[in-house]
Image (tube, rainbow, N blue to C red):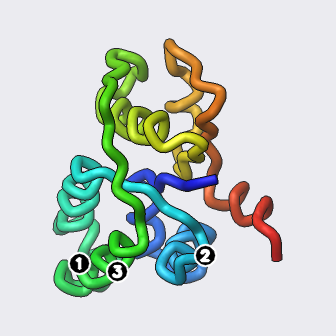
């Protein structure tokens, strides 16, 4: 199984060093959790994490966030998306996350927005969506 981190997971990980999102990111940094990414997702990560309100919440500079993000992306496998499945999800911003996961299958999307991915018009049984807490409970200790 491979894992795709929705942007909200990275935001939560930088905001709290003790939550499940931070633990998931740490496992990715250690190479324990096989991650996938795509250039478009990296652009979204950078866009969201550079917002002044996010930086204020994290007490980090964007340079510090970029260092962690770069290390995380070194560990991730870049996925080539060849087929677009739009429109599929109510939130257009989530469509490419689902497309990356479909291209990377078997793949699990790690997100705080489970309901958003459950409302897809098309169903892809090879792609699951879980919260960071659900993933942490399912991993071997």
Label 1 crowd (10 A; few <14 / some 14-19 / many >=20): some
Looking at the picture, tell me which residue is in the foreground, 63 or 80: 80
The quarter holding residue 18 reads bottom right
At 55% across and 52% down in the image, what residue appears? 110
Q: Is residue 111 left or right of residue 131?
A: left
> Depth-wise, is mark 1 or mark 2 nearer the camera?
2
Say which mark, if any, is on residue 71: 3
- Quadrant of the snapshot with the C terminus: bottom right
Q: Position of residue 124 (x, y in %)?
A: 58, 24
At 32% across and 43% down in the image, what residue appears? 80
Looking at the picture, tell me which residue is in the foreground, 18 or 34: 34
In the displayed structure, 25 sits above or below 63; it is above
Q: Which residue is mark 1?
A: 66
Looking at the picture, tell me which residue is in the foreground, 4 or 119: 4
What is the distance, in whole Å, between disc 1 and disc 3 at their CAs? Answer: 9 Å
**Numbered disc 2: secondary structure:** loop
What is the distance, in whole Å, between disc 3 and disc 2 at their CAs? Answer: 13 Å
Q: Position of residue 98 (x, y in %)?
A: 44, 34
Identify the mark nearer the N-term, 1 or 2.
Answer: 2
Q: Which residue is mark 2?
A: 32
């Amino acid at each position: 199984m491979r894992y795709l981190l929705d942007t909200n997971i990275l935001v939560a990980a930088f905001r709290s060093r003790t939550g499940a999102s931070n633990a998931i990111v740490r496992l990715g940094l250690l190479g324990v959790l096989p991650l996938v990414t795509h250039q478009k997702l990296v652009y979204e990560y950078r866009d969201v994490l550079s917002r002044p309100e996010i930086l204020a919440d994290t007490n980090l500079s964007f340079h510090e966030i970029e260092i962690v993000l770069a290390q995380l992306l070194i560990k991730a496998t870049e996925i080539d998306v060849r087929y677009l499945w739009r429109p599929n999800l109510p939130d257009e911003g989530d469509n490419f996350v689902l497309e990356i996961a479909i291209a990377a299958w078997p793949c699990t999307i790690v997100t705080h927005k489970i309901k958003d991915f459950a409302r897809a018009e098309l169903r892809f049984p090879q792609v699951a969506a879980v919260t960071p807490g659900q993933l942490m409970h399912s991993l071997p200790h």
